[in-house]
Amino acid sequence: MDESDADGEAGGRIELGSASAAPGTLDRGRLPVAELPTGGAERLPVVVANGAEDGPTLWLTGGVHGDEATGVAVVQDAVAALGECLADLAGAVVAVPVVSPAGLRRNARETYYADEDPNRHFPDADAESARPPKLQERIDARLYAAITGHTPDDTSEFAVETVGTNAAADALIDCHTAGVGSESFAIRDRVLYGDRRSESEAAALSAELGRLIDAFGLPVVREYPAAEYVEENLQRSTAGAVLNEAGVPAFTAELGAHSVVGDARLDAGVAGVFGVAVEMGLVEAEAVPESVDEPGVGVDPAPVEFPVRRFRGPTTDDSGLVRHRVAAGDAFAEDDVLADVVNAAGEERGTVRADSDGYVLGRCEGLAVYEGDPIGSLAVRDDGDLVVPRDADEE
Ligand SMILES: [Zn+2]
């Protein structure tokens, strides 16, 4: 593959699976990624909106968690709206609205292939396993090959042929939703340096990511610190692998709560995609359709001024029924009581206090808590770096 194919700027026809879009056209198709026991193939829906002019390629993915309705709708509606302005599009948008058809069929986060998070199995060259990869890992590796243009070490008939398809991403937005009643936010992963890239290359990649995520218009929440990030396998999420393995700017959008499409969140997501497309030079600001809002319109801004990172907690020391004192969007200070834990008769058993300043993204679902359970999804003050060594001992 030559360099112009790898960075998606060669122009010309874009082919992915059965979709084939000449410049100035949109096509829909299917990308086979695995064989099913019942016959036939697991196929991911793909939509390619190929602009009349050459330019960068933006990927949109949704539905890696099969119950995250708004994320799927954002990808469907954003690529359709971009498809309405192909004459003004310099570059292309490649969309996969449902990354996990097996999760969608169940309306559930996990698939029936395995009771595991499908968004933790993307390639990581450092991941060591004595066992051969199972189905989800193979599917994620094939999608990753399509996104990045990296031809995988995969001899199956479902290995995605990427050479010369012009489909490789210059940026990716992976659309999700969070818990019941959750705020909308965008997650900015830290860029790791070490074997993959130097510290200065990581800084340049992080700066480019910062530009795009700010253009999306949702409050930005930094991802967990490096050790917790790798421990939770988040470098193997869709955005994590595209960013930290392939070195392509990528982020996760969390668009409110799961299971039902939230109309305001849908509008904010589509507006955010256009904001990123404008920032990338895919489309001029004047060419954005009037029906599309400015990025960030209708979105609750962060109620604090300082940088924040994602935090699941604090945890309760007592088992019982949780009675929250704060709601999504509320700011709090270190040592504030965030929740009481009571027994079933309603008597106080204990309180749960904030470990630091921040605000509430959402409350954990479920009335019952056991000792050690987190009670919230928080955005807490972050004084850490955005560019960090993958292994602490590389410092
Ligand atoms: Zn999700």
Image (cartoon, rainbow, N blue to C red):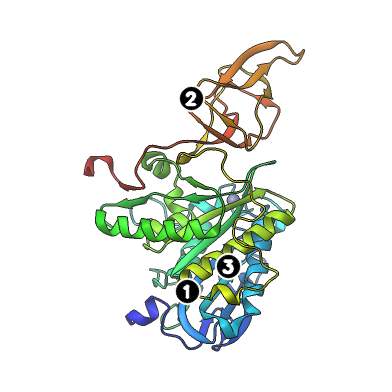
Q: Earlier in the sequence, mark 2 or mark 3?
A: 3
Q: Amino acid at mark 1?
A: Gly
Q: Is residue 232 above or below residue 136?
A: above
Q: Amino acid at mark 3?
A: Phe
Circle 3 residues within 10 Å: few <14, some 14–19, many ≥20: many
Circle 2 residues within 10 Å: few <14, some 14–19, many ≥20: some
- Which of these two is toward me, 130 or 101? 101
State how far apart marks 2 and 1 are (Cα): 42 Å
Q: Is residue 142 above or below residue 263?
A: below
The residue singled out by tag 1 in the image is 281
Left or right: where 173 falls relative to 202: right
- Which of these two is toward me, 258 or 35? 258
State how far apart marks 3 and 1 are (Cα): 10 Å
Label 2 residue SS: loop
Left or right: where 219 falls relative to 325: left
Q: Residue furthest front?
A: 286
